[in-house]
Amino acid sequence: MSEETAAEMSDRELAGERVAASFVKAVLVQARHYGCDVGELIAAAGLDENPLGVEQPQSVTVEQYSRLCVALFRSIGDESGGFLPGVNTPLGGTRMLAYSMIGCRNLEQALRRAMDFNATCRERGDGRAEHELQHDPAAKTVRLSYLSGADVQPGMQVSVLYSLAIWVRFCSWLIDQPIELLQAGCADGEPSRRRGLDHFFHCPVHFGESSNWVEFADSVLRKPIARSESDLERFLKLAPYHVVIKPMVSDGGIAARIRELLGDDFRRELPAFDELARQLNMSERTLRRRLDREGTSYQRIKDQLRREEAIAFLRNPELTVSDVAELLGFSDPSAFHRSFKRWTGRSPGDYRLS
């Protein structure tokens, strides 16, 4: 299959995707906060209605959502959408940042080049703000941090944390492999509303930190950049959708094969590691090495699958927490409580109430 044919297939798949009205309303609320003409933005996006004035607004197409975001960026002159306090990303800056990364040898070089770009090409206020990349060889993890100025208003740091999640999503696209966030930290107190956090972070989030940070396996830093400039041109047309809405899923790799093999029925006993290796027709040593190259492990994959299913089940009001525990293969609900808190940093009850 040619590269052009694959791209056309991807475009056709996206044509059928819809973006929930809640994401559209979030953009319009931000536009209203900055005094933008909401009607002009709605017209630029080609929307049939104003979601802020409708009780049950309709979802929109991927193209409409992306056009709406671009219209906001142009209206306020900031491609960060006004979400980064004290920092302005000039129009066209995101495109040039992406081009500065696309020709790099691997992801670590791309990230460091991006940090250099941000330090020199973004317009800043008086406060100190910079990125850092901290490697922990013993833990085999890396932490991407953003240190905001002390003059940032309380409650605004969480939007900086969102921007780091968006960075990681773009990096996932660059290497064509999902990057799992192991944990994150926010230089602010816990917000009363967690919908945004729950969308971007399926991991424990620590509050009251000295900076905003996300942590992931260091093995991804060695991954080569898998995209071309032509890929980037197509990506940028719908960039807001790709980095905010679309989950990063890879069709290749051993982790994807294991996820498919395990399925979603956790009431049955999952195979032990040696049995899993036999089913995949490889030695245990080879399987461990391949999982390590992808920055994951068998236990982490099992936890990911159970966590995703748990979140889906908890959104069903007809299921009790005990029902969810049973569906996930836990004989003791308290064990499920402990596991869910380890996966997300919150109890099942707290998650359901948010």
Image (tube, rainbow, N blue to C red):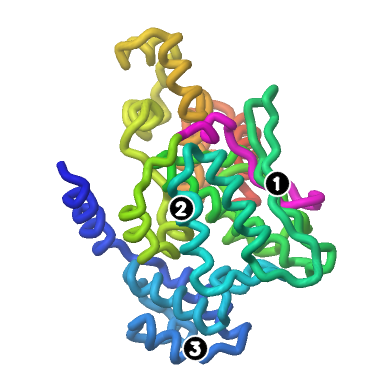
| Residue under the image location 44 percent in, 49 percent down | 102
CA gap, disc 1 and disc 3: 36 Å
The answer to which of marks 1 and 2 sits earlier in the sequence is: 1
| Residue under the image location 63 percent in, 69 percent down | 83
**Residue 221: % across, % down:** 54, 35
Numbered badge on residue 132:
1
Residue 215 belongs to magenta span: yes
Q: Which residue is mark 3?
A: 38
Q: Nearer the viewer, mark 2 or mark 3?
A: 3
Q: Residue furthest right?
A: 150
Q: Quadrant of the C terminus?
A: bottom right
* Left or right relative to 293: residue 124: right
User: For this rendering, which residue is in front, 187 or 26?
Assistant: 187
Mark 1: which amino acid?
Glu
**Residue 50: % across, % down:** 43, 86
Q: Is residue 140 visible?
A: yes
Within 10 Å of the Cα at label 1, are there few (<14), some (14-19), or many (20+) other Cα atoms?
A: some
- Identify the magenta region: 205-223
Q: Is residue 346 visible?
A: no
* Left or right relative to 216: residue 250: left
Residue 33 belongs to magenta span: no
Q: Quadrant of the N terminus?
A: top left
CA gap, disc 2 and disc 3: 34 Å
Q: Nearer the viewer, mark 1 or mark 3?
A: 1
Mark 2: which amino acid?
Asn
Which element carries disc 3, helix, strand or loop?
Answer: helix
All told, the count of numbered labels is 3
| Residue under the image location 55 percent in, 53 percent down | 167
Residue 64 versus residue 131 in the image, above or below = below
**Residue 214: % across, % down:** 64, 45
Q: Which residue is mark 2?
A: 316
